[in-house]
Amino acid sequence: MAAHGRWFTPAALPAGVQALPERQCFANAAATEQEHPHLACTEGFAVADGSPVPTAHAWCTDVNGDVIDPTWSDLGGSAYLGIVLPPALRPRNWGVLEAPDSLYQLLRNGL
């Protein structure tokens, strides 16, 4: 992740982007990208405000690299490191980091 990922800048949820349920970040990011095609679904690791522990997470990014996070819209994230994955690489209804078949292949073969 560190070799191919990049840091993204946390930003407030913009008007028109709906906050979605917690603990469903991969589905939430995919749904947000589908509703707002100018945003890109991004996967990686993030740290929630007030937590010292990074977690596998998904969010959207805009053209400026700002984080549009429909899952942590209230909680907020303080750090985001991830990769914008082309839609063809993302499994349907799951994130690469949460789907064993794609995660194992990514860990084995790289990007």
Image (cartoon, rainbow, N blue to C red):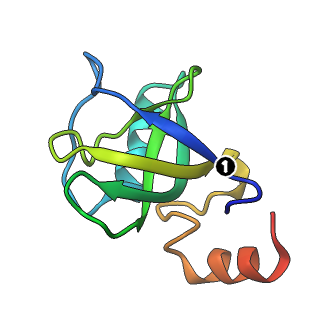
Question: In the rendered view of the protein, which quadrant contains the C terminus?
Answer: bottom right
Residue designated by label 1: 85
Q: Secondary structure at mark 1?
A: loop
Of residue 24 and residue 81, the one placed in the foreground of this image is 81
Answer above or below: position of 14 versus 110: above
Residue 61 location in percent, x, y?
50, 33
- List the single residue furthest toward the left: 74
Q: What residue is shown at x 71% (from left), y 57% (from top)?
A: 89
Which quarter of the image is occupied by the N terminus?
bottom right
Q: Is 10 placed left or right of 72 in the picture?
A: right
Task: Establish if 56 lies above or below 82.
Answer: below
> What residue lies at 41% left-to-right and 56% top-to-bottom?
46
Outermost residue, right direction? Answer: 109
Q: Pinpoint residue 100: horizontal percent, then vertical percent.
A: 57, 83
The reply, left or right, for residue 75 in relation to residue 61 is left
Amino acid type of the residue tagged 1 in the rendering: Leu
Q: Position of residue 104 (x, y in %)?
A: 68, 83
